[in-house]
Amino acid sequence: MAINRSKIIDDMSKIKIIGNDEGLVPAFNVFITQLPAAFWNSFADRLTNMVQPELLEPAEYLLVNAAHECGYHTGYGIITSEEWNAVVQPMVEKVPEDILYGAYAILTAWGWGKAEIVELIPGKKKVVRAYDYYESDVVKYGKSGKKSAYMLRGVCAAFMDLAYGGQYDSTGKTGLHTFKCEQVKGIECGDPYGEFVVTKA
């Protein structure tokens, strides 16, 4: 593998991302926000704890789907950005596998979670382990028994969509949702890491 994960994390963590007057960050051909992780965690926590038990699965689906769509479009913006071309693209030898490994290095560099691919069967399956992801706020959740990494679930599936789901579609009508992700372990549940298994939808 030609991807130098440590170098990508080091270089990308030095990039300053500045928001505009509306609180949006016009970077990587998409608009993103800079809000505290506690905001998103408390939102997801309130949503999933306030619904009736029979509505928990649909509520969780909505959270994962929001991250899936965001990860698809933001991920595409990242892998087509000037920053990507300067730092990661020179390392890419095997497409799309090296792009996937590079994307997880960037995810780590920007604090979304210390995540890496531990198994990859091209076009079929990916297993990701994540350490210290923001949704694993152990102080808040403790050993809850409820796997709560909705963002990482969506992003893990989205990255596989970008790699193996066909040409990027800005409308999301094709390419998106060709993969799904199941969280099988979680720090928020007392496991030593979060583990995410991505397979074809």
Image: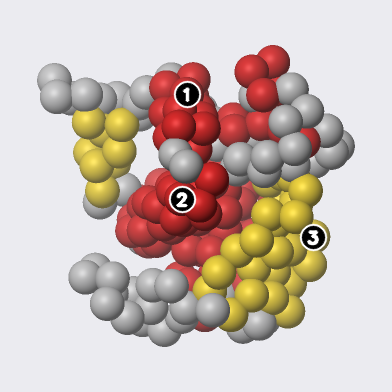
Image depth: mark 3 or mark 2 in front: 2
Q: Is residue 65 above or below residue 174?
A: above
Q: Which residue is mark 3?
A: 118
Q: Could you tell me which residue is drawn at 14 percent across and 24 percent down?
A: 22
Give, as a three-letter code, the residue at label 3: Val
Image depth: mark 3 or mark 1 in front: 1
Image depth: mark 1 or mark 2 in front: 2
Q: Nearer the viewer, residue 181 or 32?
A: 181
On the picture, is 119 further left or further right than 200?
A: right
Label 1, label 2: how many angstroms apart (C-alpha)? 18 Å
- Tell me which colouring the rendered structure shows: secondary structure
**Label 3 vs 1, first from the N-terminus:** 1
On the picture, is 15 further left or further right than 80?
A: right
Residue 175 drawn at (x, y percent)? 38, 78
**Label 3 vs 2, first from the N-terminus:** 2
Q: Is residue 74 above or below residue 19?
A: below
Q: Kindly indicate the quadrant of the structure image that contains residue 35.
A: top left
Give, as a three-letter code, the residue at label 2: Leu
Label 3, label 2: how many angstroms apart (C-alpha)? 33 Å
Q: Which residue is mark 1?
A: 42
Q: Could you tell me which residue is drawn at 83 percent across and 33 percent down?
A: 190
Give, as a three-letter code, the residue at label 1: Ser
Is the N terminus in the top left, top right, bottom left or bottom right quadrant?
bottom right
Q: Nearer the viewer, residue 87 or 127?
A: 127
Residue 113 drawn at (x, y percent)? 62, 38
Judge the density around disc 3: few (<14), some (14-19), many (≥20) Cα neighbours within 10 Å.
few
Q: Could you tell me which residue is drawn at 58 percent across and 80 percent down?
A: 200
- Residue furthest toward the top? 139
On the picture, is 68 further left or further right than 22?
A: right
